[in-house]
Image (tube, rainbow, N blue to C red):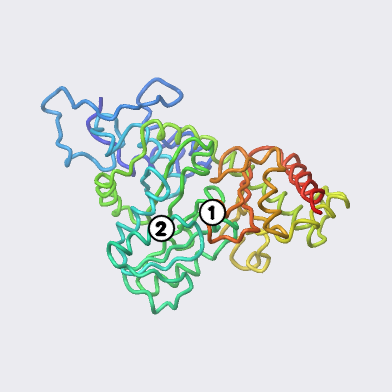
Amino acid sequence: MATNGVSMDQVEDVEFNSLHISSLSPATQAIHADDPLNLVDDVAPPIHVSTTFRYEKDPEKLRPFHQRPAPVYDQGEHCYSRHTTHSTSRLEAILSVLLHNPCLTYSSGLSAFNALVTFVNPKRVAIGAGYHGCHGVLKLHQRLSGCKILSLDCKPEELEKGDLLHLETPVNPTGLAFNIQHYADIAHSRGAYLSVDATFAPPPLQDPFRHGADFVMHSGTKYFGGHSDMLCGVLAVKNKDCIPQLLEDRLVLGSVMGGLEGWLGVRSLRTLELRVTRQSQSAQRLVDALDGALTGATVGTGLSQSDVEIIKSVLKKVHHASLQTEDYKTWLRKQMPNGYGPVFSIVMKTPEMARALPSKLHLFQHATSLGGVESLIEWRTMTDSTVEQDLLRVSVGIEDDRDLLDDLIQGFKALGEQRP
Protein backbone atom coordinates (compact mmCIF):
# COMPACT_ATOMS: atom_id res chain seq x y z
CA MET A 1 0.00 0.00 0.00
CA ALA A 2 1.55 3.27 -1.08
CA THR A 3 2.00 6.08 1.41
CA ASN A 4 2.63 8.95 -0.99
CA GLY A 5 -0.57 10.41 -2.42
CA VAL A 6 -0.93 10.82 -6.18
CA SER A 7 -1.39 14.53 -6.88
CA MET A 8 -3.90 15.95 -9.33
CA ASP A 9 -0.99 17.11 -11.49
CA GLN A 10 0.19 13.51 -11.66
CA VAL A 11 -3.26 12.33 -12.69
CA GLU A 12 -3.37 14.95 -15.45
CA ASP A 13 0.18 14.13 -16.57
CA VAL A 14 -0.23 10.36 -16.77
CA GLU A 15 0.72 8.80 -20.10
CA PHE A 16 -0.85 5.82 -21.86
CA ASN A 17 1.47 4.16 -24.39
CA SER A 18 3.29 7.49 -24.81
CA LEU A 19 -0.02 9.38 -25.23
CA HIS A 20 -0.63 12.26 -22.82
CA ILE A 21 -4.07 12.05 -21.18
CA SER A 22 -4.87 15.61 -22.28
CA SER A 23 -4.28 14.63 -25.91
CA LEU A 24 -6.98 11.97 -25.79
CA SER A 25 -10.62 12.55 -26.67
CA PRO A 26 -13.18 13.09 -23.88
CA ALA A 27 -14.67 9.66 -24.58
CA THR A 28 -11.28 8.04 -23.91
CA GLN A 29 -10.53 10.29 -20.94
CA ALA A 30 -13.79 9.25 -19.29
CA ILE A 31 -12.62 5.63 -19.39
CA HIS A 32 -8.96 6.10 -18.46
CA ALA A 33 -8.48 9.32 -16.46
CA ASP A 34 -8.72 7.38 -13.18
CA ASP A 35 -6.35 4.59 -14.24
CA PRO A 36 -3.62 5.82 -11.84
CA LEU A 37 -6.06 5.18 -8.99
CA ASN A 38 -6.91 1.65 -10.13
CA LEU A 39 -4.87 -0.18 -7.49
CA VAL A 40 -6.80 -3.46 -7.65
CA ASP A 41 -7.19 -6.24 -10.20
CA ASP A 42 -10.84 -5.39 -10.93
CA VAL A 43 -11.52 -4.11 -14.43
CA ALA A 44 -14.70 -2.41 -13.22
CA PRO A 45 -14.16 -0.12 -10.21
CA PRO A 46 -15.12 -1.90 -6.98
CA ILE A 47 -17.83 -0.48 -4.72
CA HIS A 48 -16.43 1.03 -1.51
CA VAL A 49 -18.97 1.86 1.19
CA SER A 50 -16.74 2.02 4.25
CA THR A 51 -16.82 5.30 6.14
CA THR A 52 -13.42 4.90 7.80
CA PHE A 53 -10.06 3.45 6.77
CA ARG A 54 -7.24 1.71 8.64
CA TYR A 55 -3.99 3.53 9.28
CA GLU A 56 -0.62 2.08 8.27
CA LYS A 57 0.59 -0.77 10.48
CA ASP A 58 4.19 0.45 10.31
CA PRO A 59 4.58 3.27 12.87
CA GLU A 60 7.30 4.83 10.73
CA LYS A 61 4.83 5.34 7.90
CA LEU A 62 2.13 7.04 9.97
CA ARG A 63 1.33 10.58 8.84
CA PRO A 64 -1.05 12.79 10.83
CA PHE A 65 -4.14 13.92 8.98
CA HIS A 66 -2.91 17.47 8.39
CA GLN A 67 0.26 16.17 6.73
CA ARG A 68 -1.58 14.10 4.14
CA PRO A 69 -2.07 15.30 0.57
CA ALA A 70 -5.20 17.23 -0.28
CA PRO A 71 -7.11 15.99 -2.15
CA VAL A 72 -6.16 12.35 -1.64
CA TYR A 73 -5.47 10.33 -4.77
CA ASP A 74 -4.06 7.20 -3.17
CA GLN A 75 -5.85 4.49 -1.21
CA GLY A 76 -3.14 4.43 1.47
CA GLU A 77 -3.92 7.99 2.52
CA HIS A 78 -7.69 7.84 3.03
CA CYS A 79 -8.72 8.48 6.60
CA TYR A 80 -12.44 9.24 6.94
CA SER A 81 -15.19 9.48 4.35
CA ARG A 82 -16.12 13.05 5.25
CA HIS A 83 -12.71 13.92 3.81
CA THR A 84 -12.14 11.51 0.89
CA THR A 85 -13.01 8.01 -0.28
CA HIS A 86 -11.75 5.70 -2.98
CA SER A 87 -14.81 6.19 -5.18
CA THR A 88 -15.10 9.96 -4.92
CA SER A 89 -11.37 10.37 -5.53
CA ARG A 90 -11.71 8.42 -8.77
CA LEU A 91 -14.79 10.45 -9.70
CA GLU A 92 -12.98 13.74 -9.07
CA ALA A 93 -9.95 12.57 -11.05
CA ILE A 94 -12.11 11.89 -14.12
CA LEU A 95 -14.12 15.10 -13.77
CA SER A 96 -10.99 17.22 -13.36
CA VAL A 97 -9.72 15.97 -16.71
CA LEU A 98 -13.09 16.34 -18.48
CA LEU A 99 -13.59 19.85 -17.08
CA HIS A 100 -9.94 20.82 -17.74
CA ASN A 101 -9.50 22.10 -14.21
CA PRO A 102 -9.37 20.65 -10.68
CA CYS A 103 -12.70 20.02 -9.03
CA LEU A 104 -14.40 18.69 -5.92
CA THR A 105 -17.65 16.79 -5.61
CA TYR A 106 -20.49 17.47 -3.18
CA SER A 107 -23.66 15.80 -1.97
CA SER A 108 -25.85 17.80 -4.39
CA GLY A 109 -25.73 20.63 -6.89
CA LEU A 110 -26.98 23.09 -4.28
CA SER A 111 -24.25 21.92 -1.90
CA ALA A 112 -21.71 22.78 -4.59
CA PHE A 113 -23.25 26.23 -5.03
CA ASN A 114 -23.32 26.77 -1.27
CA ALA A 115 -19.65 25.79 -1.12
CA LEU A 116 -18.88 28.32 -3.85
CA VAL A 117 -20.67 31.20 -2.13
CA THR A 118 -19.15 30.24 1.23
CA PHE A 119 -15.66 30.20 -0.27
CA VAL A 120 -15.94 33.48 -2.21
CA ASN A 121 -17.91 35.17 0.61
CA PRO A 122 -18.99 38.05 -1.65
CA LYS A 123 -20.63 41.24 -0.47
CA ARG A 124 -22.71 41.29 -3.64
CA VAL A 125 -23.94 38.52 -5.95
CA ALA A 126 -25.40 39.26 -9.39
CA ILE A 127 -27.68 36.48 -10.59
CA GLY A 128 -30.37 36.09 -13.23
CA ALA A 129 -33.24 33.76 -13.85
CA GLY A 130 -32.59 30.07 -13.50
CA TYR A 131 -32.82 27.35 -10.93
CA HIS A 132 -34.83 28.60 -7.97
CA GLY A 133 -32.73 26.56 -5.53
CA CYS A 134 -29.68 28.77 -6.13
CA HIS A 135 -31.77 31.81 -5.27
CA GLY A 136 -32.76 30.03 -2.07
CA VAL A 137 -29.10 29.47 -1.15
CA LEU A 138 -28.39 33.17 -1.72
CA LYS A 139 -31.30 34.17 0.50
CA LEU A 140 -29.78 32.01 3.22
CA HIS A 141 -26.41 33.75 2.84
CA GLN A 142 -28.16 37.10 2.75
CA ARG A 143 -29.72 36.29 6.10
CA LEU A 144 -26.39 35.20 7.56
CA SER A 145 -23.98 37.75 6.12
CA GLY A 146 -26.12 40.52 4.67
CA CYS A 147 -24.77 40.01 1.15
CA LYS A 148 -26.68 41.99 -1.46
CA ILE A 149 -28.41 40.19 -4.33
CA LEU A 150 -28.28 42.05 -7.65
CA SER A 151 -29.78 41.45 -11.06
CA LEU A 152 -27.60 39.65 -13.59
CA ASP A 153 -27.83 42.72 -15.83
CA CYS A 154 -27.03 45.20 -13.09
CA LYS A 155 -24.78 48.15 -13.92
CA PRO A 156 -21.13 47.03 -13.88
CA GLU A 157 -20.26 49.75 -11.39
CA GLU A 158 -22.56 48.08 -8.85
CA LEU A 159 -20.03 45.23 -8.62
CA GLU A 160 -16.80 45.54 -6.65
CA LYS A 161 -13.65 43.52 -6.10
CA GLY A 162 -14.37 40.09 -4.69
CA ASP A 163 -18.04 40.08 -5.68
CA LEU A 164 -19.63 37.22 -7.61
CA LEU A 165 -21.51 37.22 -10.90
CA HIS A 166 -23.32 33.90 -11.27
CA LEU A 167 -24.49 32.86 -14.72
CA GLU A 168 -26.57 29.83 -15.63
CA THR A 169 -26.26 28.81 -19.27
CA PRO A 170 -28.19 27.26 -20.82
CA VAL A 171 -30.74 28.43 -18.32
CA ASN A 172 -33.35 26.41 -16.47
CA PRO A 173 -36.10 25.76 -17.54
CA THR A 174 -36.09 27.22 -21.05
CA GLY A 175 -32.72 25.98 -22.33
CA LEU A 176 -31.78 29.43 -23.64
CA ALA A 177 -28.06 30.31 -23.69
CA PHE A 178 -26.15 33.39 -22.50
CA ASN A 179 -22.82 34.80 -23.68
CA ILE A 180 -20.26 33.67 -21.09
CA GLN A 181 -17.46 35.90 -22.40
CA HIS A 182 -19.70 38.97 -22.17
CA TYR A 183 -20.37 38.41 -18.48
CA ALA A 184 -16.77 37.41 -17.80
CA ASP A 185 -15.62 40.75 -19.20
CA ILE A 186 -18.09 42.61 -16.98
CA ALA A 187 -17.10 40.72 -13.84
CA HIS A 188 -13.36 40.95 -14.41
CA SER A 189 -13.52 44.66 -15.25
CA ARG A 190 -14.70 45.19 -11.67
CA GLY A 191 -12.40 42.67 -9.99
CA ALA A 192 -15.31 40.29 -9.45
CA TYR A 193 -15.51 36.56 -10.16
CA LEU A 194 -17.63 34.81 -12.76
CA SER A 195 -19.19 31.48 -11.86
CA VAL A 196 -21.09 29.45 -14.45
CA ASP A 197 -23.68 26.78 -13.79
CA ALA A 198 -23.17 24.58 -16.85
CA THR A 199 -25.49 21.75 -15.81
CA PHE A 200 -27.56 21.98 -19.01
CA ALA A 201 -24.47 21.75 -21.26
CA PRO A 202 -21.96 19.27 -19.83
CA PRO A 203 -18.88 18.11 -21.73
CA PRO A 204 -18.54 17.83 -24.67
CA LEU A 205 -21.11 20.58 -25.35
CA GLN A 206 -19.55 23.55 -23.55
CA ASP A 207 -16.38 24.59 -21.69
CA PRO A 208 -17.05 27.81 -19.75
CA PHE A 209 -13.40 28.11 -18.71
CA ARG A 210 -12.48 28.81 -22.34
CA HIS A 211 -14.74 31.85 -22.25
CA GLY A 212 -13.60 33.44 -19.00
CA ALA A 213 -15.26 31.56 -16.13
CA ASP A 214 -13.43 31.45 -12.79
CA PHE A 215 -15.65 28.74 -11.32
CA VAL A 216 -17.83 26.15 -13.05
CA MET A 217 -20.47 24.15 -11.22
CA HIS A 218 -22.73 21.30 -12.22
CA SER A 219 -25.59 19.49 -10.64
CA GLY A 220 -23.93 16.14 -11.25
CA THR A 221 -27.27 14.55 -10.44
CA LYS A 222 -28.23 15.34 -14.02
CA TYR A 223 -25.91 14.39 -16.89
CA PHE A 224 -22.85 13.26 -14.95
CA GLY A 225 -25.09 10.79 -13.12
CA GLY A 226 -27.29 10.26 -16.13
CA HIS A 227 -29.47 7.49 -14.70
CA SER A 228 -31.69 9.33 -12.17
CA ASP A 229 -30.23 7.32 -9.29
CA MET A 230 -27.68 9.55 -7.53
CA LEU A 231 -27.33 13.03 -6.06
CA CYS A 232 -24.12 14.89 -6.84
CA GLY A 233 -22.70 18.39 -7.10
CA VAL A 234 -19.46 19.43 -8.80
CA LEU A 235 -17.39 22.59 -8.42
CA ALA A 236 -14.38 23.15 -10.70
CA VAL A 237 -11.95 26.03 -10.24
CA LYS A 238 -9.65 27.90 -12.60
CA ASN A 239 -7.11 28.50 -9.83
CA LYS A 240 -6.01 25.19 -8.30
CA ASP A 241 -4.82 27.04 -5.19
CA CYS A 242 -8.50 27.29 -4.21
CA ILE A 243 -8.79 23.53 -3.73
CA PRO A 244 -7.20 23.12 -0.25
CA GLN A 245 -9.54 25.71 1.30
CA LEU A 246 -12.56 24.31 -0.51
CA LEU A 247 -11.61 20.85 0.73
CA GLU A 248 -11.32 22.13 4.30
CA ASP A 249 -14.67 23.89 3.96
CA ARG A 250 -16.29 20.71 2.67
CA LEU A 251 -14.87 18.75 5.58
CA VAL A 252 -16.66 20.94 8.13
CA LEU A 253 -19.80 21.57 6.07
CA GLY A 254 -20.17 17.80 5.73
CA SER A 255 -21.62 18.06 2.23
CA VAL A 256 -19.87 14.99 0.83
CA MET A 257 -21.02 12.25 -1.50
CA GLY A 258 -21.43 8.76 -0.13
CA GLY A 259 -19.16 5.98 -1.33
CA LEU A 260 -21.92 4.28 -3.30
CA GLU A 261 -22.88 7.54 -5.02
CA GLY A 262 -19.23 8.10 -5.91
CA TRP A 263 -19.11 4.67 -7.52
CA LEU A 264 -22.33 5.39 -9.43
CA GLY A 265 -20.74 8.59 -10.70
CA VAL A 266 -17.66 6.79 -12.02
CA ARG A 267 -19.88 4.21 -13.71
CA SER A 268 -21.94 6.95 -15.34
CA LEU A 269 -19.06 9.04 -16.63
CA ARG A 270 -17.88 6.12 -18.75
CA THR A 271 -20.79 6.78 -21.13
CA LEU A 272 -21.10 10.55 -20.69
CA GLU A 273 -20.15 11.55 -24.22
CA LEU A 274 -22.30 8.84 -25.81
CA ARG A 275 -25.35 9.84 -23.78
CA VAL A 276 -25.04 13.61 -23.98
CA THR A 277 -24.25 13.66 -27.69
CA ARG A 278 -27.24 11.48 -28.51
CA GLN A 279 -29.57 13.37 -26.17
CA SER A 280 -28.54 16.72 -27.60
CA GLN A 281 -28.95 15.52 -31.20
CA SER A 282 -32.37 14.07 -30.44
CA ALA A 283 -33.47 17.27 -28.70
CA GLN A 284 -32.34 19.23 -31.75
CA ARG A 285 -34.50 17.10 -34.04
CA LEU A 286 -37.53 17.53 -31.77
CA VAL A 287 -36.99 21.29 -31.57
CA ASP A 288 -36.56 21.55 -35.35
CA ALA A 289 -39.81 19.66 -35.92
CA LEU A 290 -41.93 21.49 -33.35
CA ASP A 291 -40.62 24.96 -34.16
CA GLY A 292 -40.70 24.14 -37.86
CA ALA A 293 -44.40 23.36 -37.61
CA LEU A 294 -44.99 26.79 -36.08
CA THR A 295 -42.80 28.70 -38.54
CA GLY A 296 -43.39 26.73 -41.73
CA ALA A 297 -39.85 25.32 -41.89
CA THR A 298 -40.85 21.67 -42.07
CA VAL A 299 -38.47 20.42 -44.77
CA GLY A 300 -36.51 17.46 -43.43
CA THR A 301 -38.56 17.12 -40.25
CA GLY A 302 -40.64 14.16 -41.46
CA LEU A 303 -43.86 15.91 -40.46
CA SER A 304 -47.03 15.40 -42.45
CA GLN A 305 -49.45 18.24 -43.04
CA SER A 306 -51.75 16.60 -40.51
CA ASP A 307 -48.91 16.59 -37.94
CA VAL A 308 -48.29 20.28 -38.56
CA GLU A 309 -51.93 21.17 -38.03
CA ILE A 310 -52.07 19.15 -34.81
CA ILE A 311 -48.96 20.88 -33.44
CA LYS A 312 -50.18 24.35 -34.39
CA SER A 313 -53.55 23.74 -32.74
CA VAL A 314 -52.08 23.48 -29.23
CA LEU A 315 -48.46 24.73 -29.25
CA LYS A 316 -47.60 28.42 -29.00
CA LYS A 317 -43.79 28.57 -28.76
CA VAL A 318 -40.59 26.54 -28.42
CA HIS A 319 -37.53 27.70 -26.44
CA HIS A 320 -34.04 26.30 -27.08
CA ALA A 321 -30.55 27.70 -27.57
CA SER A 322 -30.52 26.48 -31.17
CA LEU A 323 -33.33 28.91 -31.99
CA GLN A 324 -31.21 31.95 -31.02
CA THR A 325 -30.39 32.63 -34.67
CA GLU A 326 -28.81 36.07 -34.23
CA ASP A 327 -26.60 34.83 -31.38
CA TYR A 328 -25.57 31.86 -33.53
CA LYS A 329 -23.98 34.26 -36.01
CA THR A 330 -21.83 35.90 -33.34
CA TRP A 331 -20.91 34.00 -30.15
CA LEU A 332 -23.20 30.98 -29.70
CA ARG A 333 -21.63 28.62 -32.22
CA LYS A 334 -18.20 29.22 -30.70
CA GLN A 335 -19.49 28.71 -27.15
CA MET A 336 -21.46 25.53 -27.93
CA PRO A 337 -19.75 23.95 -30.94
CA ASN A 338 -20.97 20.41 -30.31
CA GLY A 339 -24.68 20.93 -29.74
CA TYR A 340 -27.14 23.11 -27.89
CA GLY A 341 -28.26 20.85 -25.08
CA PRO A 342 -30.82 18.11 -24.45
CA VAL A 343 -33.32 20.36 -22.62
CA PHE A 344 -35.88 22.65 -24.21
CA SER A 345 -39.23 24.07 -23.20
CA ILE A 346 -42.58 24.34 -24.91
CA VAL A 347 -45.29 26.91 -24.29
CA MET A 348 -48.84 25.70 -24.77
CA LYS A 349 -51.76 27.86 -25.86
CA THR A 350 -53.38 27.61 -22.43
CA PRO A 351 -52.26 26.65 -18.91
CA GLU A 352 -54.91 23.93 -18.95
CA MET A 353 -53.24 22.30 -21.94
CA ALA A 354 -49.85 22.46 -20.24
CA ARG A 355 -51.27 20.84 -17.13
CA ALA A 356 -52.93 18.04 -19.09
CA LEU A 357 -50.29 17.20 -21.70
CA PRO A 358 -48.06 14.96 -19.52
CA SER A 359 -51.04 12.68 -18.81
CA LYS A 360 -51.47 12.12 -22.55
CA LEU A 361 -47.88 10.96 -23.17
CA HIS A 362 -46.55 7.40 -23.02
CA LEU A 363 -42.76 7.75 -23.42
CA PHE A 364 -42.21 10.97 -21.46
CA GLN A 365 -42.49 10.50 -17.71
CA HIS A 366 -44.00 13.38 -15.77
CA ALA A 367 -41.33 14.12 -13.17
CA THR A 368 -38.92 16.82 -12.10
CA SER A 369 -35.15 16.75 -12.67
CA LEU A 370 -33.47 15.96 -15.97
CA GLY A 371 -30.42 14.41 -17.58
CA GLY A 372 -31.34 10.74 -17.22
CA VAL A 373 -31.46 8.17 -19.99
CA GLU A 374 -35.26 8.35 -19.89
CA SER A 375 -37.15 11.32 -21.32
CA LEU A 376 -38.98 13.51 -18.83
CA ILE A 377 -41.52 16.28 -19.15
CA GLU A 378 -42.54 18.59 -16.31
CA TRP A 379 -45.31 21.09 -15.92
CA ARG A 380 -42.72 23.36 -14.39
CA THR A 381 -45.01 25.27 -12.07
CA MET A 382 -45.19 22.07 -9.99
CA THR A 383 -41.77 22.86 -8.48
CA ASP A 384 -41.13 26.49 -9.44
CA SER A 385 -43.93 28.96 -8.81
CA THR A 386 -42.07 31.72 -10.68
CA VAL A 387 -42.54 29.98 -14.04
CA GLU A 388 -45.56 30.73 -16.22
CA GLN A 389 -48.22 28.02 -15.99
CA ASP A 390 -48.34 27.42 -19.74
CA LEU A 391 -44.72 26.19 -19.88
CA LEU A 392 -43.45 22.61 -19.86
CA ARG A 393 -39.79 21.62 -19.56
CA VAL A 394 -38.66 18.73 -21.74
CA SER A 395 -35.60 16.62 -20.93
CA VAL A 396 -34.72 14.33 -23.82
CA GLY A 397 -33.38 10.86 -23.04
CA ILE A 398 -31.70 8.30 -25.26
CA GLU A 399 -34.85 6.86 -26.83
CA ASP A 400 -35.30 7.07 -30.60
CA ASP A 401 -36.16 10.66 -31.44
CA ARG A 402 -38.84 9.69 -33.98
CA ASP A 403 -40.62 7.66 -31.31
CA LEU A 404 -40.48 10.67 -29.00
CA LEU A 405 -41.83 13.01 -31.67
CA ASP A 406 -44.67 10.62 -32.46
CA ASP A 407 -45.52 10.48 -28.76
CA LEU A 408 -45.67 14.27 -28.53
CA ILE A 409 -47.86 14.50 -31.63
CA GLN A 410 -50.34 11.90 -30.36
CA GLY A 411 -50.40 13.75 -27.04
CA PHE A 412 -51.12 17.03 -28.80
CA LYS A 413 -53.85 15.32 -30.79
CA ALA A 414 -55.43 13.95 -27.62
CA LEU A 415 -55.45 17.45 -26.14
CA GLY A 416 -57.18 18.83 -29.20
CA GLU A 417 -59.82 16.12 -29.15
CA GLN A 418 -60.80 16.82 -25.55
CA ARG A 419 -61.39 20.52 -26.15
CA PRO A 420 -65.08 21.50 -26.13
Q: Is residue 418 left or right of residue 262?
A: right
Looking at the image, is mark 1 or mark 2 nearer the viewer? Answer: 2
Disc 1, SS: loop
Quarter of the N terminus within the rendering: top left
Quarter of the C terminus within the rendering: bottom right
Q: Position of residue 71 (x, y in %)?
A: 29, 42
Q: Closest to the observer: 226 or 205?
A: 226
Type of residue at label 1? Answer: Gln
Q: Position of residue 129 (x, y in %)?
A: 51, 63
Q: Is residue 349 left or right of residue 12?
A: right
Which residue is at a point 43% across and 40% down the rendered structure image? 94
Q: Above or below — where is 157 with respect to 264? A: below
Q: Above or below — where is 36 with respect to 250? A: above
Determine which residue is flagged by label 1. 206
Q: Position of residue 74 (x, y in %)?
A: 29, 33
Q: Residue lying farthest right?
A: 305
Q: Above or below — where is 400 with respect to 388? A: above
Q: Closest to the observer: 169 or 17?
A: 169
Q: Are marks 1 and 2 in contact (CB under 8 Å)?
A: no
Q: How many discs appear?
A: 2
Which residue is at a point 41% across and 38% down the rendered structure image? 91
Type of residue at label 2? Answer: Gly
Q: Is residue 273 left or right of residue 361?
A: left
CA distance separating discs 1 and 2 = 26 Å
Tell me the crowding category of disc 2: few under 14, some 14 to 19, or many 20 or more residues within 10 angstroms, Cα based: few
Determine which residue is flagged by label 2. 136
Q: Position of residue 185 (x, y in %)?
A: 45, 71
On residue 130, the disc is: none
Q: Is residue 5 left or right of residue 198?
A: left
Q: Closest to the observer: 257 or 58?
A: 257
